[in-house]
Image (cartoon, rainbow, N blue to C red):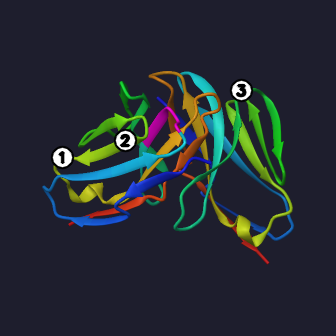
Amino acid sequence: DADVTQTPRNRITKTGKRIMLECSQTKGHDRMYWYRQDPGLGLRLIYYSFDVKDINKGEISDGYSVSRQAQAKFSLSLESAIPNQTALYFCAAGTGSTDTQYFGPGTRLTVL
Amino acid sequence: GQSLEQPSEVTAVEGAIVQINCTYQTSGFYGLSWYQQHDGGAPTFLSYNALDGLEETGRFSSFLSRSDSYGYLLLQELQMKDSASYFCAVRDQGGGFKTIFGAGTRLFVKA
């Protein structure tokens, strides 16, 4: 399995602050993803990247930006955090042939 | 647009068989995946179907009918540790091979 790590694991911030969530993977997968999870809504795709030069918007990209600094690193930024961005954020890395995605442990973000 | 429907909750007893259904609507279907998520944990991949038919992996099987836009996850010989949320997800060719997840089915396994 891919070894996907996320930092921080928990974060509390205030409305209007800029915040960055970081994700790294050690298995060399080309594809990386950012999702948010809210109770009852499943996982919603924010951004995805199929390689370092390929970044795509997902279902809910407004208010978020990403950077693929290297094949192994994919960071998510909230330019100006707002309370309805309070959620559990997951990063994933995966393969193309079967769409298998390996998820990191998640970052619980609270915006006050 | 894209949408997936799956039941919100299913309850079954230990040792039984349970089927979790998923119907989908996409602009360019490419494949159907299933993920398991325990409380407080990350989703973990269970299976992927791109073609019609049944795929079996141990106690878990996954089925796909592309013509009916329907699939299911079958869990046999249920164990208490199978209590978790199960998500179906479609890989949608339209708009760039996005992965869209359903809202999840919470499975409760009773003794």
- A4 inside magenta stretch: no
Q: Secondary structure at mark 1?
A: loop
Alpha carbon distance from label 2 to label 1: 16 Å
Residue drawn at point x = 49 percent, y = 32 percent: A30
Query: Separation of disc 3 and disc 2 at Cα?
Result: 33 Å
Q: Viewer-proximal residue, A58 or A39?
A: A58
Is residue A37 among the parts visible in the rendering? no
Kind of residue at disc 1: Glu
Q: Is residue A45 above or below residue B52?
A: below
- Provide the residue span drawn in magenta: A28-33
The verdict on a common chain for dots 3 and 1 is no
Give the SS element for disc 3. Answer: loop
Side (left or right) of B26 relative to A33 = right
Residue in the image at 50% along x and 45% along y: A26
Vertical placement of residue A74 versus A37, above or below = above
Mark 1 neighbour class, 10 Å CA radius: few under 14, some 14 to 19, many 20 or more: some
Kindly identify which residue carries mark 2: A74
Q: CA distance from mark 3 to mark 1?
A: 41 Å
Horizontal side of A66 relative to B52 (left or right) equals left
Residue A30 part of the magenta-drawn span: yes
- Point out the frontmost of discs 2 and 1: 2
Q: Which mark is residue A79?
A: 1
